[in-house]
Image: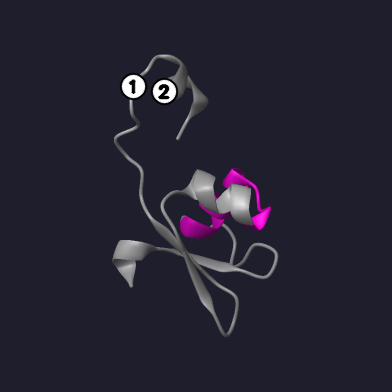
Amino acid sequence: MSSACLRKGKKAHNIKSVVAFDGLNSSYFDSITDAAKKTGVSVSSIANNLTGRSKRTKKYIWEYKNKI
């Protein structure tokens, strides 16, 4: 969720759930922002991984939840 949307009082309409795989386990998150806060990986790194610009971020491989 972008901070601009929050400041204007509007809800972001394009929030997608993501899944982080670390080899053995998977963790589900409601949004990229939520995942970034809980894992310590930057939003831009997660987005780069989801779009195919990188293969992994730290120890995670990321996918959109609806893709699995």
Q: Position of residue 26 (x, y in %)?
A: 50, 75
- Residue 29 placement, left or right of 55: left
Q: Main secondary structure of the magenta part?
A: helix
Quadrant including the C terminus: bottom left
Q: Position of residue 51 (x, y in %)?
A: 46, 55
Quick one: which residue is furthest to the bottom in this view? 24
Question: Which residue is label 1 attached to?
Answer: 10
Query: Crowding near pointer 1: few (<14 within 10 Å), some, many (20+)?
Result: few
- Residue 21 placement, left or right of 39: left
- Amino acid residing under circle 1: Lys
Alpha carbon of mark 2 to alpha carbon of mark 1: how far?
5 Å
- Residue 36's disc is none
Residue 48: in magenta span: yes
Question: Which residue is label 2 attached to?
Answer: 5
Cβ–Cβ below 8 Å for labels 2 and 1? yes
Q: Which residues are magenta?
A: 39-50
Residue drawn at x 32%, y 67% is 67
